[in-house]
Image (cartoon, coloured by chain):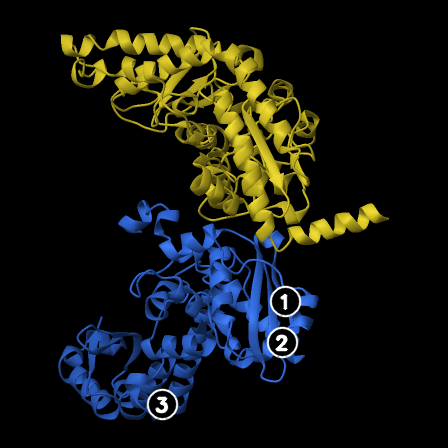
Chain colours: A yellow, B blue
């Protein structure tokens, strides 16, 4: 049996998405910007995709939702163009983000900090893994150009209080960007209600294809383009339109919205079932409480190193999970969230992330539970530190 | 950057089958108890190395026959990834049957070699080499406990790159001999810094005592100082080719003061040295400017110039060319 429980890294493309994309490779392959029939016949697909995405996130027709290559591009676009538009000319000099953002946000901010002396504030998360909205008040000033905080965290699934933070930022005249990559398809998203100026998304996180994303830009907010060229997408993002992938992303968005009740009820039930069962193992804890995406578990298993655990899950049981951010899995750094929440430093390398999808079955969940427990028992048997933990616990219980 | 840097092979696919097998079924995992040691008439040694907070920790158990110092049995426990567990398991294999003195000589490279499927192919990718280092360090700890000495006493030399076991002395020598100028060059010549990269510069996977970037900088500084000293020793009477710019200027001025300037001044003129440049062809071009009457004198570009050049060539270097500007 093979179980895919790494859906916060990427997801399986829905068969219906593949079907929707198919005609746009070798049948209707014209460039939508061409005047001829080959070009114009692709318009319907793109227009439908655009409608599906506007509707999926609650954007109005006056807003812009621009296709990009991925959320990394969307995040970079916002951060670098805000620098171009407001910081380079000396109008403002400050960006606020958080310690637990995706590298696409953190690295772009660090780049501006290093190369252009932009002041960057990294908001911390509290011991429960969330950002307290009021902490933003202490840092945002009239000189703050942008606040960029993710909607849901990729590691823990914890949902941050974006709506409250948007109000605080706007009171001081700062723009607000949220990386919504981990939210789409997992929780209802309404950009009007959130009040954000920019919202990044990526199709492959909600059963669409890789290599396509989008950026929502609120009506009335201007943002210089990052790519100059043939003035596609109203000149905001040049480059020949990636028709099949746009069609795929639109379809994936439509299905994500339709599947939301399933995600909120069925997937949540399976997640809670797995979580409850794994927490029966002694010396384990999960980061985050109720206010999380319904598919994610970040669990720490004392005495078991994350990559060792991933090895057993994969090689012995065919289960795919993650230790931290997928991008960081080769350099074996400590889990950034466990570090940020100030967990016992002995636990920094013990985090395993399980992330389900609407395809996860009851049978898979049961198999995951039993395999996970077997792997923990084997690795704790080998562990040099778990014996110590047990001895300490025994000593404590004898007191 | 190169092709392999843009998109490398999947990490676990680069492990040898021995590594995978040892991770899946470690032979030597477990503990040795005091009772077992007493029953066998040996001494139990338990040594720890690493820390969970760093991502790797290992504990080594030895049962040593005290008359012969021979390791009769050994076991390990490990908190770590697949490579760390496989390396610890292989390290224990290598310890069993050896004397403590012999075991101390086992290096992480021996462990890694033993984990290879064939002698030509590394057992693990470069960034995983550091996982084998700990298996080796814990042996030193165990031996130190057994002998009642400090583990550092087993280090005959200062190791900068633990993965490739390159010493500080080797690095200093290779940098000097080959006139190496960058950390990449040092890695190419010595393999140091080519694996987990922690020793290349601060900020890597592990904090190190020495970094290649600092070793290189200090050796380069030392080399520069030696060069200067050599030049200073040469002085203005020494080898003109090896002089510093300032020394060359002084030497040229001294020659001109001694043999040329008085004649120019007598004619109501003078000259100054503007620049001295080494050319790719091996010439040393001395740029001069005439002052006063010389600047309009017709021989200043013929006879006088020839006289200045000949004098400098004779007294300082045959490679000098004098160019008026």
Q: Chain of mark 3?
A: B
Q: Chain of mark 1?
A: B
Q: Earlier in the sequence, mark 1 or mark 3?
A: 1
- Residue A62 location, quadrant: top left
Q: Chain of mark 2?
A: B
Label 1 to label 3, Cα distance in Å?
63 Å
x, y (%) of residue A359?
44, 20
Dot 1 and dot 2 residues touching (CB under 8 Å) = yes
Q: Which residue is mark 3?
A: B236
x, y (%) of residue B86?
47, 57
Of the pair B132 and A225, the residue shown nearer to us: B132
Q: Residue at x 55, y 58 (%)?
A: B29
> In the rendered image, is residue B240 in sight?
yes
> In the rendered image, is residue A180 in sight?
no
x, y (%) of residue A82?
47, 29
Q: Residues within 10 Å of mark 2 (few under 14, many from 20)?
A: many
Image position of A145 (left or right of A24): right
Q: Earlier in the sequence, mark 3 or mark 2?
A: 2
Label of residue B144 in the image: 2
Of the pair B34 and B309, the residue shown nearer to us: B34
Vertical relation: A299 (above or below) B180: above
Question: Which of the two discs, 3 and 2, sits closer to the camera?
Answer: 2
* Residue furthest right in the image: A399
SS class of the residue under badge 3? loop
Q: Which residue is mark 1?
A: B47
SS class of the residue under badge 2? helix
Label 3 to label 2, Cα distance in Å?
58 Å
């Amino acid at each position: 049996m093979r179980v895919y429980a790494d859906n916060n890294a990427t997801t399986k493309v829905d068969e219906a998405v593949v079907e929707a994309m198919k005609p746009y490779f070798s049948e209707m392959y014209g460039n939508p910007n061409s005047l001829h029939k080959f070009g114009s016949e692709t318009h319907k697909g793109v227009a439908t995709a655009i409608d599906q995405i506007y509707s999926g996130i609650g954007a109005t027709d006056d807003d812009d939702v621009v296709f990009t290559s991925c959320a990394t591009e969307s995040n970079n676009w916002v951060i670098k163009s805000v620098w171009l538009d407001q910081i380079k000319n000396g109008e403002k000099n400050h960006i606020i983000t958080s310690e637990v953002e995706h590298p696409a946000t953190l690295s772009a901010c660090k780049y501006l900090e290093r190369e252009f002396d932009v002041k960057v504030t990294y908001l911390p998360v509290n011991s429960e893994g969330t950002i307290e909205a009021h902490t933003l008040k202490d840092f945002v000033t009239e000189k703050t150009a942008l606040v960029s905080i993710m909607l849901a965290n990729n590691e823990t699934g914890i949902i941050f209080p974006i709506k409250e933070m948007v109000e605080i930022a706007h009171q001081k005249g700062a723009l607000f960007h949220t990386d919504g990559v981990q939210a789409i398809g997992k929780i209802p998203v309404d950009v009007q209600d959130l009040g954000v100026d920019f919202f990044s998304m990526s199709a492959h996180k909600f059963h669409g294809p890789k290599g396509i994303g989008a950026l929502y830009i609120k009506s009335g907010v201007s943002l210089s383009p990052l790519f100059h060229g043939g003035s596609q997408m109203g000149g905001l993002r040049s480059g020949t339109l990636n028709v099949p992938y746009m069609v795929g992303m639109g379809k994936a968005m439509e299905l994500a919205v339709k599947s939301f009740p399933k995600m909120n009820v069925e997937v949540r039930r399976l997640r809670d079932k797995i979580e409850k069962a794994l927490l029966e193992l002694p010396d384990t804890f999960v980061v985050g409480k109720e206010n999380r995406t319904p598919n994610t578990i970040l669990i720490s298993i004392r005495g078991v190193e994350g990559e060792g655990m991933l090895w057993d899950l994969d090689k012995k049981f065919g289960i795919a999970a993650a230790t931290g951010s997928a991008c960081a899995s080769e350099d074996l750094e400590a889990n950034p969230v466990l570090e940020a929440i100030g967990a016992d430093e002995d636990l920094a390398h013990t985090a395993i992330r399980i992330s389900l999808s609407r395809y996860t079955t009851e049978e898979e969940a049961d198999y995951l539970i039993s395999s996970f427990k077997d792997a923990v028992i084997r690795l704790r048997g080998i562990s040099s530190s778990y014996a110590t933990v047990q001895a300490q616990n025994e000593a404590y219980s004898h007191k | 950057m190169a092709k392999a840097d843009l998109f490398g092979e999947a990490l676990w696919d680069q492990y040898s089958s021995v590594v995978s097998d040892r991770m899946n079924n470690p032979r030597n995992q477990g503990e040795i108890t005091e009772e077992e040691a007493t029953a066998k008439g040996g001494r139990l040694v338990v040594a720890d190395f690493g820390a969970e907070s760093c991502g790797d920790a290992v504990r080594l158990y030895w049962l040593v026959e005290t008359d012969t110092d021979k390791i009769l049995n050994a076991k390990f426990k490990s908190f770590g990834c697949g490579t760390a567990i496989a390396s610890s398991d292989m390290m224990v294999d290598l310890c069993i049957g050896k004397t403590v003195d012999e075991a101390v000589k086992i290096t992480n490279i021996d462990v890694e070699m033993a984990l290879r499927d064939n002698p030509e192919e590394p057992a693990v990718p470069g960034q995983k080499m550091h996982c084998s280092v700990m298996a080796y360090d814990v042996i030193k700890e165990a031996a130190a406990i057994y002998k009642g000495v400090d583990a550092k006493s087993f280090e005959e030399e200062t190791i900068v790159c633990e993965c490739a076991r390159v010493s500080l002395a080797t690095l200093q020598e290779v940098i000097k001999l080959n006139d190496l100028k960058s950390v990449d060059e040092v890695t190419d010549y010595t393999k140091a810094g080519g694996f987990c990269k922690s020793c290349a510069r601060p900020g890597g996977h592990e904090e190190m005592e020495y970094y290649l970037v600092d070793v290189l900088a200090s050796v380069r500084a030392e080399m520069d100082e030696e060069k200067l000293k050599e030049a200073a020793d040469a002085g203005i009477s020494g080898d003109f080719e090896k002089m510093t710019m300032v020394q060359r200027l002084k030497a040229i001025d001294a020659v001109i003061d001694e043999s040329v300037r008085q004649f120019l001044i007598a004619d109501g003129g003078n000259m100054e040295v503007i620049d001295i440049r080494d050319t790719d062809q091996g010439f040393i071009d001395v740029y001069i400017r005439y002052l006063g009457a010389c600047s309009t004198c017709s021989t200043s570009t013929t006879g006088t110039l020839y006289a200045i050049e000949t004098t400098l060539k004779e007294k300082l270097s045959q490679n000098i060319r004098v160019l008026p500007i």
